[in-house]
Image (tube, coloured by chain):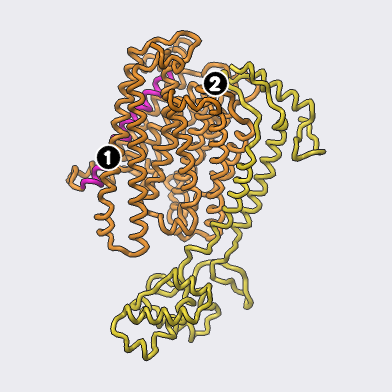
Amino acid sequence: MGWKFDQPLYCLSDEQEQKETLELWEKQKFGGLSSGNNRLPFPLTFLIALIVMTAFLVTMPIWGQRPNAQIYTSFVAAMDDPQVQQLATPEEKIAYVTQQAMAQADGVLQGAIERHPLAWDDLLNIAPQIKELQASGSKYSLDNYNVVGDRIALANFEGNFVEGGHRERKQPWWDKGYTIDVFYVAYFMIAIVLITKQLPHFSRKPDMSNAK
Amino acid sequence: MLMKYLFAKNEEIPAGSATIFFGFSSIFWFVVGTGLGSFNAAKLAFPDWVTGTELFAFGHMRQVHVLAVILGWISMAFGMTMMYMTPALGNTKLWSEKLGLWTVFMWNVGLSLGLTLLWMGITSGREYSDLIWPIDLVVIFGVLLPLGINVWMTISHRKTQGIYITNWFFGACIFMLMIVFFVGNSPELFNLTGLTEAYLTFWFAHNVLGLWITPVAAAIAYYTIPKLTGNPLYSHRIGHLHFWSIIAFYSTPASHHLMSAPLPEWLKSFASVEGVLILIPAVAFVANILLTMKGKWSLFVENIETKFSITGVLLAIPLNMQGGFQQTRAINWYVHGTGWIVAHAHLALLGMSSFLEAAAVYFGLQQMLRRKLYSLTLANLHYWFFIIGFCTYWISMTIAGLMQGAGKIYEVPYIDVVVAEHPYMIARWAGGTMVFTGNVIWLYNMWMTAREGTIVPSGRYAHELAYER
């Protein structure tokens, strides 16, 4: 097998090998079948690049995450407001508390509150646990704790190391799964380029006029 | 006749015998599998249908339907195509017709035994790998190994210098399926439990689809479409992209079936990216086949085998769009555990894959029997029953799945969701029953083809004579 590297993105085979391959394709019929030497149409090459980018962007754990205790600290602070106590129904109470929390929140937190609405009874269940955590001086901040039904639990994520020598328990936006993917995809692309560029350049078509 | 040939000398067995027995077995199991599917769907549509008997309970019948279709219809149709395409593509004959016949015999016996045990409730209890381990070993050593030996030896005895793309897939996929069967069933063989068992169960389920059903179905299209159109395959180099991206990206994302399970998050992230990258082989395959059709699109209307093949290829587009994205965290959260997934599984097995195999079985049986199709009208009727029935099933289950997802997220009482989706369960049953009816027509048509079909003259293809009287 002859390799040439003067134009690696054009063809990696030398002239003689390209000629022999094309002659073989023209001569050889697989039960009457033969193959062309066309390239992947350019829009589809672009589509494949788009797929690779999309694969990373669409899978990042930005969406579909569990709610964490941090989201509801302003709910807990607002729930003891005398105005809340005067409201008659649980629906009115939670609507008021949510409105108060949204008013104080930044854009990111507002989005989180919208994605994870809370009923008044749920708030009554989790509020004592959030207060207890706030009072405990835990080495983990509240956003390391997930709200799982009526419980507040330390999340089981293995995030980055933080000051104090322990790992964050928040879901990181990037983890070693993505790092492995970057290398995996890169190695695949290199391998597939080496394989396909060994073939005669796509501008050289086998003469299929005698194909049976 | 099968018993006679099983003990005959290899050279005394007519060429194509293994193909014919595989072909008829596959259609028979398709009738059985879809018949069971129709029966099971009736239980969901009409809850009072056949109650009080444990053997006919949904929990007993469901996995019999699933495995009759996967191991009976789909895999036997693959066996059939391998028996005639592999030698044809090497300009040689099948390495051993006798081994082929023993394979089809062992396959039918092993499958009948396995399905009977499942029906009686003797099961490993794991979805898709439901068969108990002795039957798994029969599948590996009594079915896949002999099939593999025949295919690999035929390829090694080829009279061509190169190997055509279809045979790359055939040779590689049998090998990979053996690995998948052994590793995927290891929880039962080695008593692995808990998360390991869950992961390996879906490693098996994912790879049976990804390294067997879809790639072999695609490999079949690489044969049928150039054969039927007379065009060269559009691109050998795109074939490389398809083959190697299947190996790289389809073998890795098993944990995307368990996005809500307590697997390591990094493993889910890795698998989820790979899950989207499944679109790369899909783009390569669909582009290669559709571009091969250039100048011959009239065959999509005129030729029954092309009609089935191209329908299968077109169904690969929504299949991979769904498959690529439904496993991401954001969407999986909504559709996991709903009828959407059931619809998607049928899009893969009953849609993309089955249409491609049906084309190859139509083509191969006529070719090996050297007889023209008994009735083109019945074949067209089969096609329309199949496509309308499938679409009815797929669309109704997709809608039902979205309703179930909404019910799950918004905590709608379960019984309210059951009531709301009832019309779609009836549509599901009607669609599945149409497919079953079409398959009964197909079995009759092929049986009559074998008995009364017009003999095809030497040097001609049956499909070339389809409209000649």
The structure residue drawn at horizontal position 48% and vertical position 37%, both measured from the top left corner, is: B214
Q: Closest to the observer: B365 or B398?
A: B398
Secondary structure predominantly adopted by residues drawn in magenta: helix
| Residue carrying label 2 | B230
2 and 1 marks on the same chain: yes
Report which quarter residue A19 is drawn in: top right
Residue A103 drawn at (x, y percent): 47, 81
Residue B467 drawn at (x, y percent): 41, 16
Q: Which chain is yellow?
A: A
| Residue carrying label 1 | B430
Secondary structure at badge 1 equals helix
Image hue for chain B: orange
Q: Number of numbered discs present?
A: 2
Q: What number is the disc on residue B200?
A: none
Q: CA distance from mark 2 to mark 1?
A: 38 Å
The quadrant in which the N terminus of chain A is found is top right
